[in-house]
Image (cartoon, grey):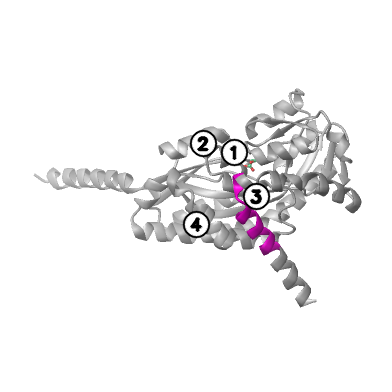
Amino acid sequence: MKRIPIFFAIVTLAVSSAAFAADTIVIKFSHVVAPNTPKGKAAQKFKELAELYTKGRVKVELYPNSQLYKDREEMEALQLGAVQMLAPSLSKFGPLGVRAFEVFDLPYIFPNKESLYRVMDGDIGKKLFAKLAAKEIVGLAFWDNGFKQMSANKPLRNVEDFKGLKMRIQSSKVLDAQMRALGASPQVMAFSEVYTALQQGVVDGTENPMSNLYTQKMHEVQKHLTISDHGYLGYAVIANKKFWDGLPSDLRTSLEKAMQEATAFERDIAQKENDEALAKVRAAGTTEIYVLPLQERLTWHKVLLPVHKEFESVISQDLIHAIYNVAAQVEQEKTNKK
Ligand code: LMR
């Protein structure tokens, strides 16, 4: 008789811990970059805060470095619910049918980070996220990375230097047009394949912010780097809509708070991470670094600007002009302060 309560206690304990396990909501968060990048670090921060604020009721499992899925596959996995969260670059939404996101790829569209953040955090960003609902996706935040630099195994100083080069790009028609405008031959390729493709000469060069270039060791297989800041790379943190909408509202509120703080953290470290990556590439001594002088930059600008016009009908002229207006407003405010 004395054994029965102990038996019941054990059974009760087993049942309640099973129930607890069943109650824990798991978020699989997949991404394609290294953990020691702005995106990788912010994903880690989100995990820590999400688990803290939900008191462990939500567990976030991170899968960096294309461990689970490559670029295109991860979008499909999210829509199918095989993973719950991603943070793809803004250049990867075109194949999903939301071409307006390609506005971020237009060369030289953002003169500075202030204009960029104002676009991301204002009406334009909200309208872009609203477009994702039809794809069963919810947009949670815009994360930063930085302005892109060009690399190859030959110097890229003048526009003519691009002639005939095979340049790896992300799956964006704007980036395709950008490389063609420079006279190069663009090749769409998943991020996880770039290092080997550069090493084996399948492509001659690529573009990325420094943090991606350095953490993927691309500098080891690229003799030349041009600091051109010719375009921008950032992210949309997204979730499977059915999953997100189906969360208990208290948990969703806690996750939103975690996301807000992780986003502030991300914006804070992005530039620093890129500056440090540049310093490390410089120290590695594998790659000659050329900072594009103003005069040459103006030539690149002139050659690349027609890409804006070319994409007015696809992206929307209104959207492109709304971004010009934000940039002009930021400039005006800066002048007024002087
Ligand atoms: C790339 O494919 O070059 C980047 O989008 C990778 C990333 O997510 O930063």
Magenta-tinted stretch: 314-327
Instruction: Note whether 260 is above or below 170 in the view shown.
Output: below
Looking at numbered disc 1 in the image, what kind of residue is underneath it? Val
Give the mark nearest the N terminus, 3 or 2: 2
| Category of crowding for the residue at label 2, using alpha-carbon neighbours closer than 10 angstroms: few (below 14), some (14–19), many (at least 20) | many
Q: Is residue 264 left or right of residue 325?
A: left
The residues tagged by marks 3 and 1 sit, at their Cα atoms, a distance apart of 19 Å
SS category of the residue bearing label 3:
helix
Residue carrying label 2: 74
Nearer the observer, disc 4 or disc 3? 3
Q: Which quadrant of the picture is home to ligand 1? A: top right
Q: Position of residue 114 (x, y in %)?
A: 69, 63
Residue carrying label 3: 104
Asked whether the beta carbons under mark 4 and mark 3 sit within 8 Å of each other, the answer is no
| Category of crowding for the residue at label 3, using alpha-carbon neighbours closer than 10 angstroms: few (below 14), some (14–19), many (at least 20) | many
Q: Which of the two residues, 303 or 5, is positioned nearer the viewer here?
A: 303
Nearer the observer, disc 2 or disc 4? 2
Residue carrying label 4: 49
| Category of crowding for the residue at label 4, using alpha-carbon neighbours closer than 10 angstroms: few (below 14), some (14–19), many (at least 20) | many
The residues tagged by marks 2 and 4 sit, at their Cα atoms, a distance apart of 24 Å
Disc 1 within 8 angstroms of ligand 1 (CB): yes
Looking at numbered disc 2 in the image, what kind of residue is underneath it? Glu
Q: Is residue 314 left or right of residue 151?
A: left
Question: Does 318 appear in magenta?
Answer: yes
Residue carrying label 1: 32
